[in-house]
Amino acid sequence: MVEKYLDTVKEHEQNSQNKPLIMSATSKSVSSKTPVSIGIIGSGHRGGTFINELVKMPELARISAICDVSTERMKILTTRFGLKDTKQFTSLDEMLAGNLVEAVIVTVPDNLHRWAAVKIFEAGKDVMLEKPLAPTAEDCRAILQAHRRSGRLMQVGFVLRSTSFYRRVKAIVDSGVLGQIMFIHACEYLGVQHGASYMTRWHRKRENAGTFLLAKCSHDLDILNWLTGSKPQAVASFGGNDFFLPERGGAAHCSECERTETCPYQVDLNWHFITGETRPPGSDLCAFNDDKDVIDNQVVILEYANRIRATFELQLFHPVGGRRITIGGQYGYLEGDFEAGKITIHYNTDGRIEEITLKAANDSGHGGGDFEFTRSFVRAIRTRETNSAGAEAGLAANVIAEAVERSRLKKCVVPISLLEYEVGSIQGKIQHRKKSKTIRK
Ligand SMILES: NC(=O)c1ccc[n+]([C@@H]2O[C@H](COP(=O)([O-])OP(=O)(O)OC[C@H]3O[C@@H](n4cnc5c(N)ncnc54)[C@H](O)[C@@H]3O)[C@@H](O)[C@H]2O)c1
């Protein structure tokens, strides 16, 4: 059995590095050895992360340009990483003009993804769009249509798929050692500071990032879809804001609060600002503020089209934080702890227990996923082939998150038509709906 899934592991690793799964339009004739010229829009936390990864691979990529409304952030990052030749822009149109960049990494807040992605596709460049694709399905559709028209490459920032941990879990599931998979339980817990940061940054409002499940856990929804090889056809959910309530808070800002010494939720502004940046007064909003409309705990049940049942649980006030997963199959049960890099398989057949401890492939963020993901994107720009998550996976997370939200609000099971997930049928479906409306009139 062990050999069986180790073979699958090898196959997955080869797939993730070499084997094409998605192909897109060919690039102009540029030598495959020439480093790709990358532009980055959004020089905040994720923008800084991608710069940090790209500078480790100068043979593959150079950062030709960055764009941000904050000249201070661009200055800090170009100085920190010694990017003397990187051009700085406050206008995306100006960065896209001419041939300065072949591809753009989009790391602006979620509500600007549509605006940025459509412009970049229209300029004929490849795109790496941070997850989630966009706050609403309508925005996703506009992005997907621009993507299709352009014929360019698109990768969505589901970096967990690029980690040793989730690749191994996927390899185990695909190897068949667990037999037919019956259920999956997964969770994401945010530690106190991480949770408090989401309650005080731009994500605290749905108009900026959509529902919290989408904004933060689209990663996890994508992992469930990837592991099951299917899509949910019905979902149900309960959740709310029950912990970060205004009545539990102190003063409006931590600097004015008498509980500062003892409050574990006191905001750590390193989550808000990049190192060295000016921090305007009033940025230290209390996590228990009343200026937010996202939830802080939620449970979700999903029934997949292939009959796998899954549950997902999130909470933002966990003492430690982390992602865990359990998978129940015909022959055994898998338990995994992402942060600890531990996977345990219990076999029903002979009572055997197998323990696997994994080391991240490198020291980048998201368990080594950030480096692997970035490298796969810049390689794909030359090869025109990628096996990372693309538009379809991005749209699926939105479709699920929207159905889950309907269920949470109405307290009912919400069915999802599998047509909703089909990128190709979007246009047809919209037209079909319009037609049916007309007929009913
Ligand atoms: N893959 C992941 O695990 C992961 C993790 C965190 C965040 N994200 C996503 O990455 C993206 C960026 O998140 P972040 O935490 O880096 O945010 P951030 O607030 O730190 O950075 C966003 C940057 O965009 C800039 N910006 C805003 N409007 C702009 C405009 N019109 N033109 C140019 N620049 C503009 C801001 O000045 C800021 O520097 C979001 O979509 C977020 O959801 C993904």
Image (tube, rainbow, N blue to C red):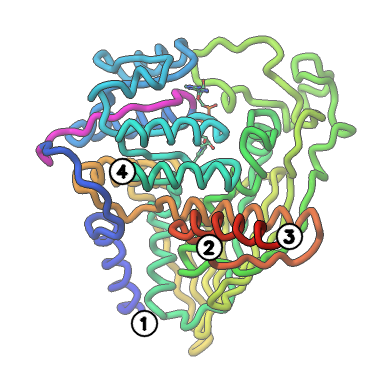
Q: Which residue corresponds to the image point at 27% horizontal and 40% vertical from the top-left?
A: 378
Instruction: Give the CA distance from mark 3 to mark 2.
Output: 16 Å
- Residue highlighted by disc 4: 152
Q: Earlier in the sequence, mark 2 or mark 1?
A: 1
Q: Which residues are magenta?
A: 31-44
The label number, if any, that marks residue 34 in the structure image:
none
> Is 359 above or below relative to 263?
below
Q: Amino acid at mark 1?
A: Met
Q: Earlier in the sequence, mark 3 or mark 1?
A: 1
The label number, if any, that marks residue 224 in the structure image:
2
For disc 1, the neighbor class at 10 Å (few under 14, some 14 to 19, many from 20) is few
Residue 288, x across and y down, in percent = 79, 31
Instruction: Give the CA distance from mark 3 to mark 1.
Output: 37 Å
Q: Earlier in the sequence, mark 3 or mark 4?
A: 4
Residue 26, x across and y down, in percent = 20, 46
Residue 293, x across and y down, in percent = 76, 37
- Judge: label 2 CB < 8 Å from ligand 1: no
On whether residue 66 falls in the magenta region, the answer is no
* Nearer to us: label 4 or label 1: 4
